[in-house]
Amino acid sequence: MSKKSGIITVTMNPAIDLACTVPDFTPGAVNRVTTCQTDAAGKGVNIAGLLRKFNLPVTVTGFLGSENALVFEKLFKDKGMVDAFIRVPGETRTGIKVLDPKKQTTTDINFPGLSPQAGDIEKLISTVDRLAENSAMVVIGGSMPATVCASVMDKLVAVIKSRGAKAVADTSGSALDAAIKAVPWLIKPNNDELSDLVGRPLKNIKDLVREARHLNRTGIAQVVVSLGSRGALFISENEEFLARPPAIEAVSTVGAGDAMIGGLVAGTALGLSFRDRARLATALSAATVAQAGPSLEALGAARTLEDKVLIEPINI
């Protein structure tokens, strides 16, 4: 990796995740929780936590509600993350995840997010500008608050690139569309998000590969398309393949995409080949699906899965 070794994660709409396990969850009926777990979360926060397990230097920023920031501040301190979050009035939202182990489903109930104002947004852009100067990669993850225009993604990617850092955009909808216009280094839409991006259903692997190749040709160095339990497509200028995870018993999909991005970023920071990054990212994602919380407690479970990840050529 270059002399610029720091990694920044940007989370504009973090959440406190309350994951509840409810066997045979039934809408409209009385449901009983068997276990529950509360985590300070959000895509960038989850990714940062994973990167710290590789002992990589991480600074976290974004918007954080001043009224319930303590749970996040404790996490940052415990995990050794540098806290550069911008505090805004109000509470960081709560996200309820209802996990049904019998039906193997996850139901998300997401509360409204914070309402950053124009001054907060400008402060975030200037913070990312300053931090990116000494950073190798900046990951922008998750959704955007309702008061933040999607064009902010375009500005953030442009600022990151102007500082010579690699911009990673892990978002969806209009925010992903705006990020793509600024040509980030890496994106990771899932198959539905890619369909939304191009404005039509992508019904098979051939369609997904064709659109991923198109995005790669526009200058996005790495395009990864998540296919859920089927794995992910990895497209770059020189290599393309499908990485398939081993069969596992799924507990929750919460945090699986974050683990994949974290693996790709960590693998890049550690100097792994594109193929080895894909293997690591796929194993981390699979290990996350096999547990209830959004973040792995340790890397051991994922490491045991790496050799079981199948890398298949794309013959389309």
Image: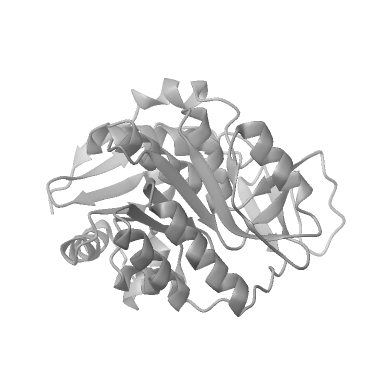
The quadrant of the picture occupied by the N terminus is top left
Quick check: 54 above or below 132? above
Q: Quadrant of the C terminus?
A: bottom left
Expressed as whole percent of the image width and height from the top left, the position of residue 123 reads: 56, 68
Which residue corresponds to the image point at 60% horizontal and 33% vertical from the top-left? Answer: 80
**In terms of depth relative to the viewer, which is nearer, 84 or 140?**
84
Q: Residue at x 34, y 47 (%)?
A: 232
For the residue pair 286 and 162, the one nearer the viewer reads as 162
Q: Nearer the viewer, residue 225 or 161?
A: 161
Residue at image point 87% right, 56% down: 30
Q: Is residue 145 visible?
A: no
Number of marks in picture: 0
Q: Where in the figure is residue 96, as x and y percent of width and height?
A: 73, 55
In the image, is 269 to the left or to the right of 247? left
Q: Position of residue 127 (x, y in %)?
A: 51, 60
Task: Determine whether, in the image, residue 271 is placed left or right of residue 246.
Answer: left
Q: Judge left or right: residue 296 versus residue 66.
A: left
Residue 273 is left or right of residue 158, and the answer is: left
* Residue 21 image-quadrant placement: top right
Q: How is the image coloured?
A: one colour
Q: Nearer the viewer, residue 167 or 257?
A: 167
Q: Quadrant of residue 205?
A: bottom left
Residue at 36 percent across and 69 percent down: it is 195
Quadrant of the rendered image containing residue 162 = bottom left
Q: Position of residue 86 (x, y in %)?
A: 64, 60
Q: Is residue 185 visible?
A: yes
Rendered position, 36 above or below 141: above
